[in-house]
Image (cartoon, helix red, strand yellow):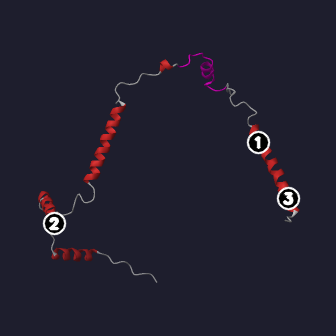
Amino acid sequence: MNASLRLFVIGGHALRTSGLMGCLLVGASLSGCAANPFAPQPLDKASAAAPEITAVAHNNRPFPTFAGIPAVPSDIRPDRAWGKAAAELEGQGAELARATAPGTWSLTGTDAFAQRAQAEAGPAAGAESTTADTEAFAKQARARATPPPPPKK
């Protein structure tokens, strides 16, 4: 196998360049750690809140303890009741799915339903229209209509 030496020279150059770039990146990222980010920041003395901030910062107050945690409320539902309610809801959902499954209902008897609905609604006042009424309305609309202007040439 006779490979060109040029390939090996380029490969070595790329390796040195990538190593140098890696060192530069590590150095740049560590340069941000030179300062202490947890050090207290200087306080602006001209600020209106500066005296109050200083007083609160230097005030020795006790740390909270576990005794300060409030007691568990007594008016909440116990865990088992949540489970029973969830199971009941799941049962109602399954019952609804069974009641509305395909094949459990049909569209027969629609005439009787329509007659019953019309009887409950009552007679419609003036709902009946004749052909003469329609023609009179159309004639009146044509008389009021204004034709559009002719197209410009």
CA distance for labels 1 and 3? 27 Å
| Residue 14: image location, x then y, percent | 82, 54
Q: Which residue is mark 3?
A: 8
Disc 2 or 3, which lies upstream in sequence?
3
Q: Is residue 146 above or below residue 105?
A: below
Q: Which residue is mark 1?
A: 26
Query: What count of labels does the image hold?
Result: 3
Choose top left, top right, bottom left or bottom right for residue 84: top left
Q: Secondary structure at mark 2?
A: loop
The outermost residue toward the front is: 1
Assign the N terminus to one quadrant of the image. bottom right
Label disc, if present, on residue 127 of the rendered structure? 2
Between 23 and 97, the residue placed more toward the observer is: 97
49 vs 26, left or right, is left
Range of magenta residues: 46-64
CA distance for labels 2 and 3? 96 Å
Residue type at tag 3: Phe
Mark in the foreground, 2 or 3: 3
Q: Residue at x 68, y 29 (%)?
A: 38
